[in-house]
Image (cartoon, rainbow, N blue to C red):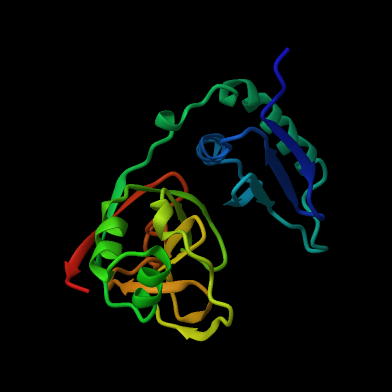
Amino acid sequence: MPRSPLSARPYGRAAVMVDVAGDDPLPTVVALTRALRGLADPEVVDLVPGARTVLVLLREMPDGAAHPGAQARLADTVRSLAPHLAAVAPEDVEGPVVEIPVVYDGPDLDDVARLAGLTTTEVAERHAAGLYTAAFVGFAPGFAYLVGLDPTLQVPRLADPRPHVAAGAVAVAGEFTAVYPAASPGGWRLIGRTSTRMFDVARTPPGLVEPGARVRFVPEGAP
């Protein structure tokens, strides 16, 4: 009997953590998140997908705990969904393609080019040539970790993070690329900027790029 790709456990007093097994957990993470949202369980107030997990936040009573039995019921729901997700493939959960215009003039563009052994123009071209997938959202609301970065552009984070990175900064670090949705400290290398608003509480959903979405960066000017 094949091993279930999912295991669920109580997380604190009002949440359930679902661990996703496998060498490529992203399709299952995305499929599970969609399946749980589709159930519209009134006890579920939020879902937080990660690289290999889905955190399910439950409605709290005045004492901060979930309603009696809610964690166990949610874990049973996850187990019931597991057989349907065991063989999910990447193409089964591909989301829409979100195009993000970028001006490639970031303050770290020269350093990324030097580390990659490329010209700044080549860095911009290679970054814009990729079709990325949002693996998970974290660090800040709307901050989507995008996989699919050209290996030559996979450079280390800054040794000393910046105290301020502007909203809309397009950055790379390790195997990921991302757009900073709001001004914040940050240690990723900044290669460009976009005027696209990545997170808006007035929008449904508020995040422009949800887990499973695909992203293409469209150059707007020469570096």
Residue positioned 82% across, 45% down in the render: 68
Q: Measured from the top left, where is residue 26 in percent x and y?
A: 53, 40
Q: Measured from the top left, where is residue 62 in percent x and y?
A: 78, 63
Residue positioned 37% across, 62% down in the render: 203
Instruction: Name the residue furthest left.
Output: 221
Q: Is residue 205 above or below residue 23?
A: below
Instruction: Name the residue furthest front.
Output: 117
Q: Measured from the top left, where is residue 8 in percent x and y?
A: 75, 38
Q: Is residue 218 left or right of residue 157?
A: left
Residue positioned 48% across, 64% down in the render: 155
Q: Is residue 103 above or below residue 43?
A: below
Q: Quadrant of the N terminus?
A: top right
The residue nearer to you, when weighing 222 against 88, is 222
The picture quadrant where one finds residue 20 is top right
The picture quadrant where one finds residue 219 is bottom left
Residue positioned 55% across, 41% down in the render: 33
Q: Measured from the top left, where is residue 106 in percent x and y?
A: 33, 77
Q: Quadrant of the C terminus?
A: bottom left
